[in-house]
Amino acid sequence: MNNTWNKMIYNLWAPFYDSFFNSALFLQARKTVFKDAPIPLGSRILFVGVGTGADLQLLTQKDSTVTAIDISPNMLQQAKKKYEHSQTITFMEMDAQHMSFSDESFDIVIANLVVSVVPDPILCMKEIIRVTQKEGYILIFDKFQPDNKKLSIGKRIIRPFISFLGTDIGRSFAEIVAPYLETVKQLESTPVLFNGMYRKILLQKIR
């Protein structure tokens, strides 16, 4: 996967994305992810890979300031249509691996269904941590290979074909976060969908 390919694929996905990933089981999973999320009043929130804006409706803290980025202009357009009258949400086309924000710009960074999509998840995680305020939080909902387990033969076979659709089913979150364990601590890793393939992960930046 690369950015050019991802942008093309998700531009094509945009009109249909909500039908697949913001309904039924996925909608319930999203609600589970946001339940008890540590989002204080007045928070500066960054959505990395906001897509069509499916997660924005789950925010209950209406006084927060929200910045929402995505690499796909068509996905962003879908999100903008939903929130065209919002005074607190700023949409920006941006690469999650190379964000233009200053260090420690946000109290909480939400990265749902993006770490499995970007070409370089370790670089993406580095950027997410960089823009998070010290003592701030990072909330992730995504699909990861179970820790300490090898990818099954079936998944190894279909992995290239799934990547063609713009996502990777074989990434290990433990490997992605490993370079940054002196900077963040993991507070939660909860299975939420498809026997734990999709997980809710909560990190806190400690230095």
Image (tube, rainbow, N blue to C red):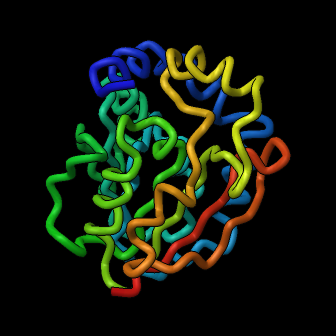
> In terms of depth relative to the viewer, which is nearer, 44 or 154?
154
Residue 20 image point, x, y percent: 67, 25
Classify residue 42 as left or right of residue 199.
left
Residue 43 image point, x, y percent: 38, 76
Which quadrant of the structure image shows residue 63?
bottom left
168, above or below 19, in the image: below
Residue 100 image point, x, y percent: 14, 53
Residue 132 image point, x, y percent: 32, 72
* Residue found at x 73% / y 59%: 32
102, above or below 67, in the image: below
Classify residue 29 as left or right of residue 65.
right
> In terms of depth relative to the viewer, which is nearer, 62 or 174?
174
38, above or below 129, in the image: below
* Residue found at x 71% / y 43%: 150
Question: Count the marks: how many?
Answer: 0
Q: If the image is split into quadrants, where does the N terminus sit? A: top left
* Residue found at x 44% / y 13%: 12
* Residue found at x 56% / y 24%: 17
Residue positioned most to the right: 195
